[in-house]
Image (tube, rainbow, N blue to C red):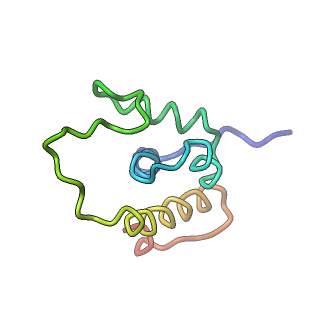
Amino acid sequence: MGQGRRHFTDEFNREAVALLVSSGRPLSRIAGELGISPSMLRNWRNGCGGPDAGSARPPIPASAPHSAADPAAEISVVEPKIRRRQLSKDGNVEISGRDLR
């Protein structure tokens, strides 16, 4: 028999969507890296609400300056956290509270 349905925390969902939006990489690639189906990630992205919820990227107002934060640095921080949470959901690893910050 197959495994039961997996459940993810709201925080995991938000961080996965944030990674998708900030990385500029294809949805299918992000989903594969996180071990989830593309449709699941798409549903999380579309469920975030707002006028542009279905967009892969939020529009940037013409007057808005580019973010000073380095997207690659942000991804390098967020991606391992998401992966650790995914692995802990699967029971493959144990994580400490310190790792979840």
Residue at the extreme top of the image, as rendered: 51
Residue at the extreme left of the image, as rendered: 63
Residue 38 locus on image (x, y percent):
61, 38
Residue at the extreme right of the image, as rendered: 1
Residue 35 in the image: above or below residue 74: above
Front one among 89 and 57: 57
Q: Tell me the residue at 13%/43% (across/down).
A: 63
Q: Tell me the residue at 46%/49% (across/down).
A: 24
Residue 35 locus on image (x, y percent):
65, 51
Residue 92 locus on image (x, y percent):
68, 65
Q: Is residue 63 left or right of residue 77?
A: left
Q: Quadrant of the C terminus?
A: bottom left
Question: How many dots with numbers?
Answer: 0
Q: Tell me the residue at 52%/49% (across/down).
A: 25
Residue 53 locus on image (x, y percent):
36, 29
Q: Tell me the residue at 86%/39% (across/down).
A: 1
Q: Is residue 12 left or right of residue 30?
A: left
